[in-house]
Image (tube, rainbow, N blue to C red):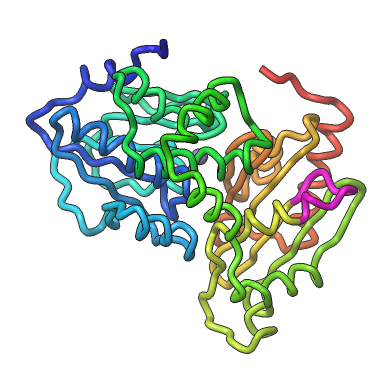
């Protein structure tokens, strides 16, 4: 029987006040699935609950799921938030770069599976389980705890979130994820879920992939993919000044390069005219992607995630240039390989 965490959440929520479930900015499949499923569960328990995200919606894959499963998710800016609104964050932590602060009032709950920062913000309800492969796994525990059978659309969303974050159950998977997988599989439309997973790229991405294959460098087991947006867009005939890739694509490119047998650590860097974003993947347990990005970007940016996948940004105006940035990462990687680190 799972821990009574949902019960604790109900204890801190006021049934007479509205609840907003907020996914992190540019939500991915796991964030959408977690938020949607939590909203549905709270509604079942009598709460007036809405679901929103910060930033913009990323590419066709996530929007396709939202359309197919009729997920009622809206941009945060379209909601009226007042002092009495109870905000619950899913798949992200307040204070992170990728979590828009929706109001000046304190948030009510944080539900996440990323490695938390040293100081987690004060909040009435916190359920952070970094050992879980997905946030969807946590929300599924709430369904188990309340003996609620997830409806087919909820099960399909949760299965997709779980499979996406764990790369088809190949990374960050624990026993609870495995149990969630087998519990959700036949309750869901697993064929729909598998279809979504198989179709992450669009033909529109081919010029970007071609650019990536022309702009990578390898140093030992480490691979850098250097995407300089303006040049990249020029290369295929359009050069909008503020163009940036859909965030998901950075991760997909890192995943792709990680498939090369010789490469065990990938750093994809997208340098745009205004921002620089990074996506890291690791399959070397001695090279934790979350700690490495934190250390390498200390003083110039921020990042975090999991040991096998992480992401971050370099703050505007602090980009040291591609060569210098790569050097920072190589130095940190060398330190980790030489000294090792203590896995807590
Ligand atoms: Mn997640």
**Viewer-closest of 192 and 60:** 192
**Viewer-closest of 135 and 223:** 135
**Residue at 56% of width from left, 57% of height from top?**
248
Residue 284 shows up from this direction: yes
**Residue at 45% of width from left, 25% of height from top?**
128
Q: Position of residue 252 (x, y in %)?
A: 64, 56
- Check the image and report above or below for 141 versus 284: above
Give the quarter of the figure containing the N terminus.
top left
Q: Is residue 259 magenta?
A: yes
User: In which image quadrant can residue 11 be found?
Assistant: top left
- Which residues are drawn in magenta? 257-266
Instruction: Name the side, left or right, on which 239 lies relative to 219.
Output: left
- Check the image and report above or below for 63 versus 40: below
Give the quarter of the figure containing the C terminus.
top right
**Residue at 62% of width from left, 72% of height from top?**
205
Instruction: Name the side, left or right, on which 14 lies relative to 50.
Output: left
User: In which image quadrant can residue 283 be found?
Assistant: top right
Q: Position of residue 50 (x, y in %)?
A: 21, 45
- Check the image and report above or below for 163 versus 248: above
Q: Which residue of the protein is positioned furthest toward the bottom in this rendering?
A: 237
Q: Position of residue 225 (x, y in %)?
A: 76, 61
């Amino acid at each position: 029987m799972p821990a009574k965490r949902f019960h604790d959440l109900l204890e801190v929520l006021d049934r007479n006040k509205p609840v907003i479930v907020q996914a992190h900015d540019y939500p991915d499949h796991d964030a959408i699935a977690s938020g949607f499923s939590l909203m549905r569960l709270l509604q079942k328990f009598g709460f007036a609950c809405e679901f929103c995200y910060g930033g913009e919606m990323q590419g066709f894959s996530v929007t396709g799921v939202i359309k197919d499963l009729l997920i009622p998710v809206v941009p945060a800016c379209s909601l009226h938030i007042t002092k009495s609104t109870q905000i619950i964050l899913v798949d992200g932590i307040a204070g992170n770069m990728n979590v828009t602060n929706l109001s000046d009032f304190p948030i009510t709950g944080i539900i996440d599976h990323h490695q938390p920062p040293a100081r987690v913000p004060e909040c009435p309800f916190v359920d952070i389980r970094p050992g879980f492969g997905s946030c969807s796994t946590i929300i599924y525990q709430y369904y188990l705890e309340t003996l609620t059978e997830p409806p087919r659309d909820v099960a399909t969303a949760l299965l997709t979130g779980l499979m996406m974050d764990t790369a088809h159950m190949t990374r960050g998977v624990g026993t609870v994820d495995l149990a969630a997988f087998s519990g959700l599989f036949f309750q869901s439309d697993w064929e729909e879920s598998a279809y979504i997973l198989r179709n992450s790229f669009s033909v529109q991405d081919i010029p970007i992939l071609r650019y990536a294959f022309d702009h990578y460098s390898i140093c030992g087991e480490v691979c850098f993919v250097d995407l300089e947006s303006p040049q990249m867009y020029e290369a295929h005939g359009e050069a909008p000044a503020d163009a940036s890739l859909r965030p998901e694509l950075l991760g997909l490119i890192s995943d792709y390069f990680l498939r090369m047998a010789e490469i065990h650590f990938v750093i994809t860097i997208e340098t745009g005219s205004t921002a620089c974003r990074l996506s890291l993947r690791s399959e070397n347990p001695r090279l934790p992607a979350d700690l490495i990005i934190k250390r390498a970007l200390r003083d110039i940016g921020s990042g975090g995630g999991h040991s096998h996948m992480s992401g971050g940004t370099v703050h505007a105006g602090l980009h040291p240039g591609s060569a210098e940035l790569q050097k920072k990462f190589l130095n940190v990687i060398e330190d980790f390989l030489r000294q090792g680190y203590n896995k807590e």
